[in-house]
Amino acid sequence: MKFHTGFAGVLAGTLITLAPAAMAQDLTLTLGHAVFESHPLHDAAVRFAREVDERSDGSIKIDIFPARQMGDVKELMEGVQLGTVDMTVNSSSALATLTPAVDAFQLPYVMRGYAEFAKMAVSPEAEAIMDALGDHGMIGLGLYEGGQRHFLSTGDTVTSMEGFKGLKTRVAPTKLFLAVWNAVGVNPTPMAYGEIYSGLETGAIDAVEINLTSIESEGLYEAAHNVTLTGHYFWPGIMLINKDLFEGLTEEQQTILRESARASVEPQVMAVADYDEELKDTLAAKGVTITEASDDFKAQLEEAWAPVVKSYADSDPLIAAFVEKAQSLQD
């Protein structure tokens, strides 16, 4: 099993912390997720479990089942809705079909950096969006981060809007992402996540918008060698629990779960920020050219994406409130 340096220490310490509490539990909840243990969202689950253990004095135990042991993203989300799975931490983009307001978390350049994301993740505006998941049998306890997105290409490093023109670029096939990438002139190419490496290698795609964590863990640096640090949006995950299960808990247990999620958000988000800095050096050592997008380039991207942001904000008051709050932090 592969662990990266930053999260491995956390996980090792957490296992030691949680083991004594496993002797006698008043409540045990299962938490399944779809990512490997080297992924930031597994770190989110571990940090949450540690907080729950400490705040409950060992009376609540969270059993974590990573790497699709309990199903893939879709199966886990449906399992939480139906009550066959207690909890999951799942990509927010997978939830947008149920609650469109969730798209607020991935609008381009609405949040600029990890510190700003950490503030917005625990804001009333973010909580209001997660509360809307209650209409679909789930409670959103916390908003975590899987890694800010950048641009990886097989050809020349993209340093201008002109460089995007016509590039066959893998994007997740959602309405939002197609709108975002059409706006800058690439040729959005839907493709399964597991096919990205071969797509880059064979030329089926020229580029992919992705986080540094995935470039390293999936070995994509072997097939594409130029990264532009655009930081265009984040890849959040939401901690979910079945609504009926949660409402059947005692008030004290509910409070512990909510407070544990809130307390673990900022440390988890900033750990991803630190890991990103490590990865820049790691990838450079593997022959990847890392280029920071210029302020002028970012300003052009923001201008191109402004109509998309406005369209989504106009479509939902929850999105509008989130965008307004996030943009106020940039003033």
Image (spheres, rainbow, N blue to C red):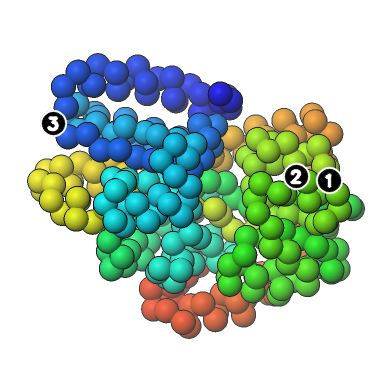
Which residue is pictured at 31% across the width and 57% down the height?
81
Q: Do the numbered discs 1 and 2 sit on residues whose CB atoms are within 8 Å? A: yes
Neighbour class for label 1 at 10 Å: few (<14), some, many (≥20)? some
Secondary structure of residue under mark 3: loop
Locate residue 97, reporting x and y percent. 46, 68
- What residue does disc 2 label? 197
Q: Is residue 5 left or right of residue 9?
A: right
Query: What amino acid type is highlighted by mark number 3?
Result: Asp
Number of marks in picture: 3
- What residue does disc 1 label? 201
Q: Of 199 and 5, which appears nearest the observer?
A: 199
Locate residue 138, reporting x and y percent. 29, 58
Give the Cα distance between marks 1 and 2: 6 Å
Locate residue 101, reporting x and y percent. 42, 70
Residue 118 appears anywhere in the view: no
Which residue is pictured at 81% across the width and 49% down the height?
200
Q: Quadrant of the N terminus?
A: top right
Give the Cα distance between marks 3 and 1: 52 Å
Taking 74 as reference, is 272 above or below it?
A: above
Neighbour class for label 3 at 10 Å: few (<14), some, many (≥20)? few
Q: Is residue 178 left or right of residue 287?
A: left
- What residue does disc 3 label? 26
Which residue is pictured at 37% across the width and 56% down the height?
78
Give the Cα distance between marks 3 and 2: 45 Å
Query: What amino acid type is highlighted by mark number 1?
Result: Glu
